[in-house]
Amino acid sequence: MVNEPISTAETSVPAVASTTSDSRYAIELKKISKRFGAVRANQDIDLAVSKGTIHGIVGENGAGKSTLMSILYGFYQADSGDVYINGRKTLIKNSRDAIAAGIGMVHQHFMLVDPFTVLENVMLGAEEHALISRSATDARRELLRLSDTYQLTVELDQPVGELQVGEQQRTEILKALYRKADILILDEPTGVLTPQEADQLFEVLKSLKHQGVTVILITHKLREIMDITDTVSVLRQGQMVAHRNTSDTSMQELAELMVGRALTETNHQRSTPLPTDAETRIKTNNLGVVDEHGKTRLTEINLEVKSGEILGIAGVAGNGQSKLLEVLAGISSPTTGEFMMNGHEVTRDKPMGPLKMRQLRVHHVPEDRLKLGLVKAFTAAESSVLGYLYKEKFTWRGLLQLHNIKKMCARLMEGFDVRPGNPKLKSASFSGGNQQKLILARELDKSPEVLLVGQPTRGVDIGAIEMIHQKIVDMRDGGCAVLLVSVELDEIMALSDRIVVMYEGRIVAEVNGRDADKTMLGLMMANAHTGAAA
Amino acid sequence: MNTSNIELPAWLEVVVIPILNIIMALFFAGLIMLAIGVNPFEAVRIMLNGAFGYQEGLGYTLYYTTNFIFTGLAVAVAFHASLFNIGGEGQAYIGGLGVGLVFLALDSVLPALLLIPIGIAAAAIFGAAWAFIPGWLQAYRGSHVVITTIMFNFIASALMVYLLVNVLIKPGQMSPESRYFEESSWLPQMHDAFAWFGLSITKTPLNLSFVLALICCVLVWIYIWRTRWGYELRTAGFSESAAVYAGIKPRRVVVSAMCISGALAGMVAVNEIMGVHHRLIMNFPAGYGFTGIAVALMGRNHPVGVIMASLLFGVLYQGGAELAFEIPKITREMVVAVQGLIILFSGALALMLRPWVVRLYLMVRPVREVSA
Amino acid sequence: MLDTLSTVYATIDATFRVSTPLILCAMAGLFSERSGIVDISLEGKMLAAAFAAGSVAAVTGSAWAGLGVAILTSIALALVHGFACITHRGNQVVSGLAINILASGLTVVLGIAWFKTGGQTPSLENSARFMPIELPLAGALSDVPIIGQFYSDVVSGHSVLVYVALLSVLVTWWVVYQTRFGLRLRAVGENPLAVDTAGLSVSRLRFAAVAICGGLCGIAGAYLSISQNASFVREMTAGQGYIALAALIFGKWRPLPAMLACLMFGFLDAVAIRLQGVPMPYIGEVPVQLIQALPYVLTVVLLAGFIGRAIAPRAVGVPFVKER
């Protein structure tokens, strides 16, 4: 394999000297940087991918993978840095430029027109003639040839909306190939596929490689990287931290590179074992959810959280944790099974809404603070009573008790060090960390008996993280049952007394918080572990 | 440069940009005047004089203002729930039906002191009922209020024509209108009310419903910003997911917001039917419902803004009538055209000038760098 | 028997005449909404076009000049709509409403300023109008019972714009379903992001659609003032733009069903005039207002999902924002 320039250094090292370029590479990126406001999504990214190889890019959520790919496909412009395609410096301002440069992309969310047939979707934008019928004849011939060459079988005259996801994805690949793409980028392609469909996809990718197509695979699933890629790069916090030949690395190493070192080594686990008479506050029994589109979101969830413990739920985003939190908080109902919440049974036929939950002292810090946790257009004071207006302190005969609300908000802001501590400011004008502190303050202030927490430190500055963790631990020590959902392994490991790992809507493993090991958890999250108790 | 996520200070956002938008609209209105050979500045002078220059003019201005406050509030309340109620016209019309039925049945039975509150309630209830159906259909059947309220305007119009031609018409009369209500039951005119206190002002259509309109402004303000229900309305309007998280039922909010909106639109009938015409007539909403949209857009859905915008439209209507009287080349429809321009610039193109304002603002005051 | 047949034929004949502006506007709306732009300003564009046609035909004495200026006027308004909705991502309903109100005011203002006849344009000579044209053999065939009579009474004897309207349905169908432009148009109304990633310009497609919409509304307006009538009269569209919108929804945003809905609504209108004051067997006199309200009632019932489902183009009404 031709991979000399791939660096083996730990930190960001240019893959090639930044003034020359090499036509052996299908894609070369030199010092690509992109900021969104204060956030540095990509920082001096260097990358070189040899022609006719499969290259993997791994990284955690928010590491900057999507931004990088969006730059390659012309959704965003890089603030600085250059892109070389096949040795030629190329400016990609929009999708048209990307297509012209021979780049095809299979987005995580498919870019398909549902009512259109496969044939129409493939033709769209690349029709040869003004009449559909003439273009269709040509396209059909070409597509049959392509599907033959690459084993990409799709029923051409079926509306894509009625196809299986796997077939929709093949349609996307056909779209790219029909446009004569010789570089194919796939963004989290197996996230929506069954294992069988994923295997099929890999066969297709291998055959593409043999025909000389360069494939870039963006994923967080390490097993896939090991199975199919020739080379791999690791992104962490917007920077390329390593380039490797796949044959020279291991899942363990990649997992470590992806996650980086823990920020703090503090552990908050209970120092004493849980008393045997600790009350069970949450208990689920074969909980399952099938959503309105008929997709299974949760399957046979069985877990238990007792007073005085933190149960951490680890997993890669999108493996059912959010749905679980939603169901337990009363926002949606289970479709099968049931759960006990602080002594009350909830089933599909006996749902319990968020208000009732709060009255049972079940409080919820939602994962998505901007969509659920607060209303951006509200003042901090208004956001600080979201969900709590039933309390007499805040409404009297329907009238808001603004004085009380403001006073309470000011108190919350002081107690949680929310800055600036002004209840009249718009919720949107606080930084992410301060918004999060306000929400936490609101929920913790009600002395919950059950606390459901989702991503408590997402987008929160480092300084605030430790404080938020301490507050959650204080709750636990006060006898609260805490269920913590986080995609940050550090966080899960620092806080949880017990950890369950979710994968594709199921609980695939459970470990003791003290025994947890990051590499092991990383493998469990990718469902690549062996031997761990399920 | 993408300027849409750059925050501006409130005074730029709610004062300067809206005023710039109105200036744009008035600029184009001026061009139209020039096109038909009228000096725009002269026209403005005549309009202002007609609207404020003498007592009768002022009375008419405020009489028009009353209608706009009602319909403007109606649209504003719905907007806070992120609903677009285009049906003010029909809701006002049906509100008139409520007033008409009550007065035709009871005007010789009940004293005015009882009848008037019942009449006001009837206007509100009938207006609300007419808005309830589109609201319910959106919440529970998924049909969008924009389209259904348009359709309901036409249905209301057909219904009212039918009733006036066939049922409520005063027997032995050609024109389709009901009999006059008993004079004792009429809503007092403003000049009557002033006379109670020994003050004498010119007789105009202005009546006590103007006071009702101002009361409604206060009530709407309290409702939206000072009650639990208003809080729930705004929560659901801004973010349905946050509402669900907070235990608010967005569907109920949709229905109740539409009902309140319809009730406010129905109040136009209090001014028009109880206060001015004293009988049920055809087409009395005369576009006030549509103007309410412009009023709400300009007034940024705030009662104070609604009052200001209503006053502006009151001036346009009354001044426009004066203008049509003074300059034969100009007709009252000039006002309608200006209204269209205002909706265009204050509504559809509301953000057109924003990037420029942002650029100017940034030149004066550069953005503070936020550390990562 | 013969008399009944003539009545039937006369009613069908009237249906075509009444439906013509509806059909043109429904096709206009179809282009706009299929591209993802809500258009409630069919009414306003048609009114402005009617005024333009009436004015220009009166001044120049040429119906074709009237038609041309009507189309240009309507396209200009359509581009204003596009400028607000596509370029500035303004609220599409507000923009449409603004155009309706602007047209309603401006046509009267300009009419009075220019012609001084209460907002009406001068009555047109027949030479300045699109008059009914007799199709070949219509006279000769009129004596052939039933079919010949149908040909001469119903098929023949309409103005050229009536035939244009019917033709517009076929052309719309052909463009939307058979051409590359149509494929892209339908795609951009369903999933603009897919169109963008396919390397096409969303705004260009939408502007094209909105302009075509303007052109068709222009023809509809010209028909009203210089074909069906002999002058522009204030508010002469009288809600027909909204009926066309209802028909478009009723036809589920497809050309042929939308045309049928227009014909049905037109038929109701034609019948309403005939039924006025005529008691029907068993049910007595049908109020004409009920028939007039029927298109709106039916559309509401349809939208509420009680008779089938009208599913709008998925992206309709949503401004396209590329950066997320």
Image (cartoon, helix red, strand yellow):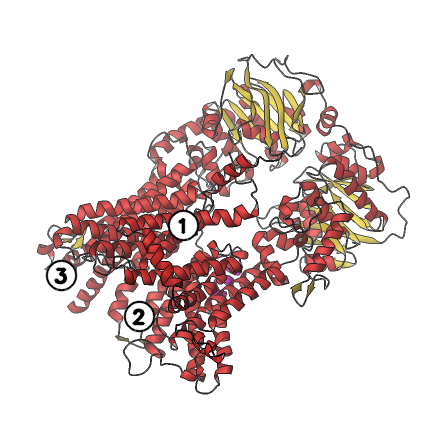
Which amino acid lies under the numbered mark 2 shown in the image of this protein? Answer: Val
User: How crowded is the residue under tag 1: few (<14 C-alpha within 10 Å), some, or many (20+)?
Assistant: many
Q: Distance between the residues labelled 1 and 2?
A: 36 Å
Residue identifier under label 3:
C145
Q: Is residue A425 magenta?
A: no
Q: Which mark is residue A78?
A: none
At mark 3, the secondary structure is loop
Q: Which mark is residue C288?
A: 2
Q: Answer whether residue B249 is visible to the viewer in this image.
A: no
Q: Where is residue A443 in the image (x, y as percent from the top left)?
A: 74, 52
Q: Position of residue B15 (x, y in %)?
A: 51, 50
Which amino acid lies under the numbered mark 3 shown in the image of this protein? Answer: Pro
Which of the 4 image quadrants contains residue A343? bottom right
Locate the C terminus of chain B and report the quarter of the image it occupies: top right
Magenta highlight: main SS: helix
Q: Distance between the residues labelled 3 and 1?
A: 56 Å
Indicate left or right for B92 with A238 as reference. Answer: left
The relative height of residue A68 versus residue A113 in the rendered view (above or below) is above
Q: How far apart are marks 2 and 3 (CA)?
A: 33 Å
Q: Which chain carries label 2?
A: C
Q: Where is residue A424 in the image (x, y as percent from the top left)?
A: 66, 51
User: How crowded is the residue under tag 3: few (<14 C-alpha within 10 Å), some, or many (20+)?
Assistant: few
Depth check, mark 1 against mark 2: the one in front is: 1
At mark 2, the secondary structure is helix
Q: Residue B344 carries which label?
A: 1
Q: Mark 3 lies on which chain?
A: C
Give the residues in magenta: B131-143
Residue shown at 90% from the left, 50% from the top: A276
Which amino acid lies under the numbered mark 1 shown in the image of this protein? Answer: Leu
The relative height of residue C46 versus residue A54 in the rendered view (above or below) is below
The relative height of residue B83 versus residue B117 in the rendered view (above or below) is above
